[in-house]
Image (cartoon, rainbow, N blue to C red):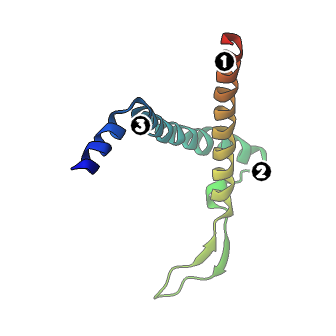
Amino acid sequence: MQILKEFKEFAVKGNAIDMAVGIVIGAGFGKIVSSLVSDIIMPPVGLLLGGVDFKSLKLTLKAATADAPAVTLNYGQFINTVIDFLIIAFAIFLVVKGINTLKRKAA
C-alpha cells in the first residue's frame, strides 16, 4: 500500500498535473502545426516550384508486385515533417524566451 500512497502523492502534485496538461496541449498544437504545414504552407510552395505536390514525392526502391506493396522512400512527407518540427521548435523557443524575459524582470 505504500507504493499506492506514494503514487497518489506524485500524481496529485502540481508538477505532474502541469506536465500532463502540457503534453495534451502540445499534442494538439502539433496537429495544428502539421495541418498548417501540409494544408497552408506547402501547397503555395509547391505551386511556386512548378506545381510540386510534396506529399507525393517519393523514390521507389522496389516496384509493387501482386504479393507485396511498393517499397518507397517518402522524402516529400519527410520535408513536411522537418518543416513541422522547425515551426514547433521556433514556437517553443519564443515561449521559453518570453518566460526567461519575465523571470529577469521579476528578479
Separation of residues labelled 1 and 2 (CA atoms) = 48 Å
Taking the view exactly as shown, the residue that stands out farthest to the front is 2
Q: Marks 3 and 2: in contact by CB < 8 Å?
A: no
30 to 75, vertically: above or below: above
Q: Which residue is mark 3?
A: 16
Mark number for residue 94?
A: none
Q: Which residue is mark 1?
A: 103
Residue shown at 50%/38% (left/top)?
A: 26
Separation of residues labelled 2 and 3 (CA atoms) = 49 Å
Which image quadrant for residue 8? top left
Q: Earlier in the sequence, mark 2 or mark 3?
A: 3
Three-letter residue code for mark 2: Gly
Residue shown at 36%/40% (left/top)?
A: 10
Q: Earlier in the sequence, mark 1 or mark 2?
A: 2
Three-letter residue code for mark 3: Ala
Q: Disc 3 on helix, strand or loop? A: helix
Residue shown at 57%/39% (left/top)?
A: 33
90 lies left or right of 11: right
38 lies left or right of 21: right
Separation of residues labelled 1 and 3 (CA atoms) = 22 Å
Q: Earlier in the sequence, mark 1 or mark 3?
A: 3
Q: Which residue is mark 2?
A: 50
Q: Residues within 10 Å of mark 1 (few under 14, many from 20)?
A: few
Residue shown at 69%/13% (left/top)?
A: 107
Closer to us: 73 or 28: 28
Q: Disc 1 on helix, strand or loop? A: helix
Which image quadrant for residue 70? bottom right
User: Marks 1 and 2: which is nearer the front?
Assistant: 1
